[in-house]
Amino acid sequence: QKEVEQDPGPLSVPEGAIVSLNCTYSNSAFQYFMWYRQYSRKGPELLMYTYSSGNKEDGRFTAQVDKSSKYISLFIRDSQPSDSATYLCAMSWANTGNQFYFGTGTSLTVIP
Amino acid sequence: GAVVSQHPSWVICKSGTSVKIECRSLDFQATTMFWYRQFPKQSLMLMATSNEGSKATYEQGVEKDKFLINHASLTLSTLTVTSAHPEDSSFYICSAHRTVSGNTIYFGEGSWLTVV
């Protein structure tokens, strides 16, 4: 079983839709959770960073962590064509952990 | 957010030559940096973990003599592709580990290597 599972998609939605992206994980020691956005032919960009459980909101983006279910989500409200990209989840252990575990990425296309 | 700069963005080299790619964390110190390779429409593949002042740790199947990694300072790691061949053509990405105010990594913009 992989440490982190992410549905690769592709996911296609109309402009203005709410997008839900998800990852599940198996290691209960993970404490730090990240979402990255990667445009074609570019390096990934950190979108959201969350420590432990709970929600975090930044503009149109909301990250949720449910440690009891080992499940994290990224919601995008009022999706725009510029949101079309691959979204990667990543997670790590606490404190000195310098190992990061990535999902395979979900490809999202927002249709105008 | 934190900035990681990667240079060059694009490089074309002749088969048999060596190419160096630089990764710099511009506004934080990074004891650890990571190097990845990514093929079109595929996920990131971790090549090696670079630790400042010590030897890099390579993932299984990655030739350490082929992909030389040096992490000489807390803000700079370099990847040298030695005796490059066309099969080494790929997108190479670095990331830097930031431990201040959390535990996360920031990626460089990536470097496209074409070996002709």
Image (spheres, coloured by chain):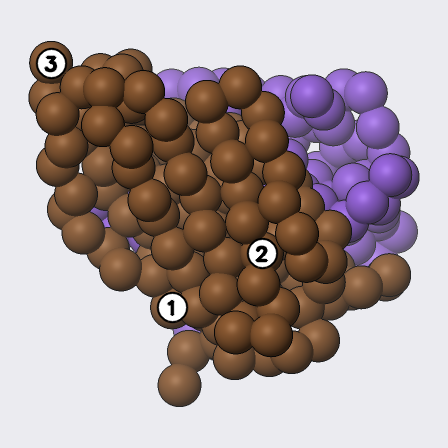
Chain colours: A brown, B purple
- Label 3 or label 1, whichever lies nearer to me, is 3
Which of the numbered marks, if any, corresponds to residue A50? none
Tell me if residue A109 comes above or below residue B96 in the rendering: above
Question: Is B2 positioned to the left or the right of A68 in the image?
Answer: right
Write the residue at 38% across / 20% down: B10
Q: Is residue B1 visible?
A: yes
User: Can you give x and y, in whole percent of width and height, for residue B90 in the image?
Assistant: 31, 41
Residue type marked 1 = Glu
Write the residue at 86% across / 34% down: B29
Q: CA distance from mark 1 to mark 2?
A: 15 Å
Name the residue beneath numbered marker 2: A65
Q: Quadrant of the N terminus of chain A?
A: bottom left
User: Can you give x and y, in whole percent of width and height, for residue A82 in the image?
Assistant: 29, 15
Q: CA distance from mark 3 to mark 1?
A: 29 Å
Q: Is residue B90 visible?
A: no
Q: Earlier in the sequence, mark 2 or mark 3?
A: 2
User: Can you give x and y, in whole percent of width and height, for residue B71 in the image?
Assistant: 77, 44
Which of the numbered marks, if any, corresponds to residue A112? 3
Name the residue beneath numbered marker 1: A5
Q: Residues within 10 Å of mark 3 (few under 14, many from 20)?
A: few
Residue type marked 3 = Pro
SS label for mark 3: loop
Q: Earlier in the sequence, mark 1 or mark 2?
A: 1
Q: Quadrant of the C terminus of chain A?
A: top left
Q: CA distance from mark 2 to mark 3?
A: 30 Å
Write the residue at 45% across / 51% down: A73
Question: Is B92 positioned to the left or the right of A29 in the image?
Answer: left
